[in-house]
Amino acid sequence: MALSPRYPQGRPVQPVGNDLGPKRRLEAALGMCEQLLDQVPVKGFKIDPGGGGNWDDVSIKELCERVGCRLVISRDVSQAAKRHIRDNMGALKLVKDRRNRLAHGSLSFVECCGETVTVGELKEVADAVSDYLREAVGCFDSFIAREIVGKRRRERRREVRVS
């Protein structure tokens, strides 16, 4: 594979999820075309996960859409995660909201739980969150195995056949 004289180590890639203005978008598109035509390998890149502690079912779905990972959550698990528990929020949104408010000092631990939260409710939230995350992680695991590891194996097999 030939390397471009401009980018002997591989061309830097625009991070996934960064919006560009019209001029920069054109520059990035032309750069990608040049990279494809010159057959320059894509140097490692980082996908900004976003969130910063703000993960809920919506942000997980958006990340999956950005990277091309098919998120498949079973109906029972999805319903349990989205079922309103308190303040019109499902389990993941509730955990995200309470974590943020506790972390930033706008809510005390007593206000967060108080005397109104039962052990049963805590277990329901914990089960809904863990079941959802288990299935989401399984989707990412399959995506990585198929799209990254699988592609590398197929490329190596092609290289062996060509040699």
Image (cartoon, rainbow, N blue to C red):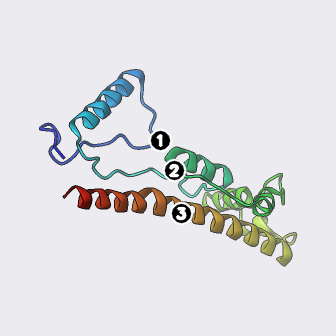
* Residue 15: x %, y % from top left: 39, 43
Circle 2 residue: 50
Query: Which of marks 2 and 3 precedes in the sequence?
Result: 2
Residue 150: quadrant of the picture: bottom left
Circle 3 residue: 142
* Residue 147: x %, y % from top left: 45, 56
The reply to whether discs 2 and 1 touch (Cβ–Cβ < 8 Å) is: yes
In the rendered view, tell whether residue 32 sits above or below residue 26.
below
Q: Residue 17 got which mark?
A: 1
In the rendered view, tell whether residue 155 sits above or below residue 137.
above
Residue 100: quadrant of the picture: bottom right
* Residue 127: x %, y % from top left: 75, 72
Circle 1: element type: loop
For the residues marked 3 and 1, what is the alpha-carbon distance in whole angstroms?
22 Å
For image coordinates 38% across by 52% down, the residue present is 46
For the residues marked 3 and 2, what is the alpha-carbon distance in whole angstroms?
21 Å
The reply to whether discs 3 and 1 touch (Cβ–Cβ < 8 Å) is: no
Residue type, mark 2 in image = Gly
- Binning the other alpha carbons within 10 Å of mark 2 as few (below 14), some (14 to 19) or many (20 upward) gives few
Circle 3: element type: helix
